[in-house]
Amino acid sequence: MQLVLEKRPERSAFIAVASPLIAIVLTLVTMAILFAIMGKNPIAALVVYFIDPLTDAYSLQEIAVKATPLVMIAVGLSLCYIANIWNIGAEGQFIAGAVCGSWLAVHTNGTDAGFWVLPVMLLLGAIGGALYALIPAICRVYFGASEILTSLMLVYVADLGMDYLVRGPWRDPKGLNFPTTAEFDPVATVPTLIEGGRLHAGAIITLIVVMLATVLLGRMIMGFEIRLVGAAPRAARFSGFHADRLVLFTFAVSGALAGLAGIIEVAGPVGHLQPNISPGYGFTAIIVAFLGRLNPVGILIAGLFLALTFIGGEEAQISMKVPLDLTKVFQGILLFYVLACDSLIIYRIRLLRTIRKPVPAHA
Amino acid sequence: MLDALAQIFSLIFSVSFILTVTTASTPLLLAASGELVVERSGVLNLGIEGMMIMGAACGFAGAYMSGSTLVGALCGIVAGAALSAVFAILTLGLAVNQVAAGLALTILGVGLSGLIGAGFVGEQIVQAPRLYLPILTGLPVIGRILFGEDAFVYVSIALIIAIWLFLYRTRAGLILRAVGDNHTSAHALGYPVLRIRMLAVLFGGACAGLGGAFLSLSYTPFFIPGMTAGRGWIALALVVFASWRPGRLVIGAYLFGAVSILGLALQPLQLGVPQQLMNALPYLATVIVLVLISRTRGTAGSAAPASLGLVFVPDR
């Protein structure tokens, strides 16, 4: 007896819809087992992780705040992944955007610069992210270097570059030697949506991005090109689409979105530039993109769910004394299950009676 | 300026610097050796970083509880192989995209290592013992370099020689390369493509785990979360740099090892260059080298497996 994969005659529409849900259920079961191994009550732990954050207004806002960068980055990444282009350096582009936008905030700090500061900061952030993302894209298109490795390497470079700036030239002179810039002026800060709350205007920008991406993928020729290059590269070549141009385009767009997310995060919830502005948004966004099945609306839902795991993980760390790294374990397991379930859309698993294998020709 | 250059040169050619280069290169060489075999079988496992950090955490845990470096190293190997088994089930068993599965492996490995290592942060163990041969180790200059390393260094060299012999001098190695170059033909000839790839992936995981264990058992005798610091990714780049050839892999690993500690070694010289730039050197070097190597390499010099990263589902 053996298990084999077999191609389905056609894609399973049921599993296509259900796969993220199956994956989540499987992950929850795995997590329950993990909690039990760690000596915690599995049910109580899962409640702290996934239910408690949904029960108070502060946590709900916080989920939206965390989902904002996740969704924005993941929408950009999904464009790449649909076309089989692998930008995995969104974390670096996030930082590059944060740094470029902060440049203006730092240099106008304490001056009477007007309301134009924030819009220009956001623009600079997007441009910075896009330019940073174009480095691996250009390396791939003109030199043939793997964009996977170069984009990832540039994450470390961006991180060190930001570290240099906040410890060196941009450090707040009144900051007691802490590695941080001065607190941004009000004109350089993303406004909150609720008086005294945490939810900020970035959430609205994210919703607009989701809508634009839906239109791009569903209604525009560029979106068709992205999907075609991903699904049938040869057919795309014959119909005259340029794969190289698409690499540059998807990298630039995903970089711009990651950069925008970066500057919004810095000018919004954080309020100044400092090391560790991101708990790995750029990497978690990869999971969000796949959990959302590379579909903008799906990504919106997936982003909210992954944001919930960040908040739940923090609550569980405080109330149940479980390490914060459990959230990463959870996210990694989730991605595994999502990928496995997605495979079942195209394939099915069949149990076979062992057939006698033909002897290798030269054995 | 000249004075600074002279200082740099005298430092680079000092015995202590060469000794640090070996220790910085060994984890890269170990992990990259495994990945070379994996990629030669046609599988791209991007999860080296995750398997290495798991090797570091489990290796340290094993050594701390048993008091033995050997047990620690074995724990690291098992941890790396176990994690790679998950990858194998997904990509070979369920035909999942290898790039995505590799990323998942890294995310999972980083998280799990934090979980396992949490209890051991701040603890210390006895560093892996270094070889001591009565007369040879005492030789001036070359004594310490050739005969005074720890076991990991010698294992890494033996491993890459064994891999070279396996790939180019054995029948099994030939079959492995055939599977990597054309899985459809290899399957048609009756070779068990998926089983061969499974074994290669497990071997790669074991090597990455050992490389990680080296970090927490010998490089620094303690465990810090995230201590691999991108070495797994650099190992991946090394395989490309080496054009999938074992000999060039050794050169590459030692070159990168030297670059990666150059920043640390030059720190006392006060060159007026920001430390962050020095720390960014290995990553920048990786990008530059990838660009140069991909540009200058024709199809002739490269042994890139033709089926690398492609999904294979056997028909019956």
Image (cartoon, coloured by chain):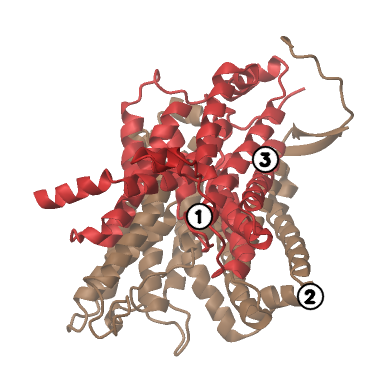
Chain colours: A brown, B red
Q: Which residue is denoted by mark 2 in the rendering?
A: A41
Q: Hey, which residue is sitting farthest front in the picture?
A: B135
Other-residue count near label 2 (Cα within 10 Å), few / some / many at <14 / 14–19 / ≥20:
some
Q: Nearer the viewer, residue A215 or B135?
A: B135
Q: CA distance from mark 3 to mark 2?
A: 32 Å
Q: Answer whether residue A127 is visible to the viewer in this image.
A: no
- Which amino acid, mark 3? Ala
Q: Under tag 1, what secondary structure?
A: helix
Nearer the observer, disc 1 or disc 3? 3
Q: Which residue is denoted by mark 1 in the rendering?
A: A214
Name the residue rendered at 48%, 26% in the picture. Answer: B304
Q: Under tag 3, what secondary structure?
A: helix
Q: CA distance from mark 1 to mark 3?
A: 35 Å
Callout 2: chain = A
Q: Hey, which residue is sitting farthest bottom in the picture?
A: A196
Quadrant location of the N terminus of chain A in the rendered image: top right
Name the residue rendered at 79%, 75% in the picture. Answer: A41
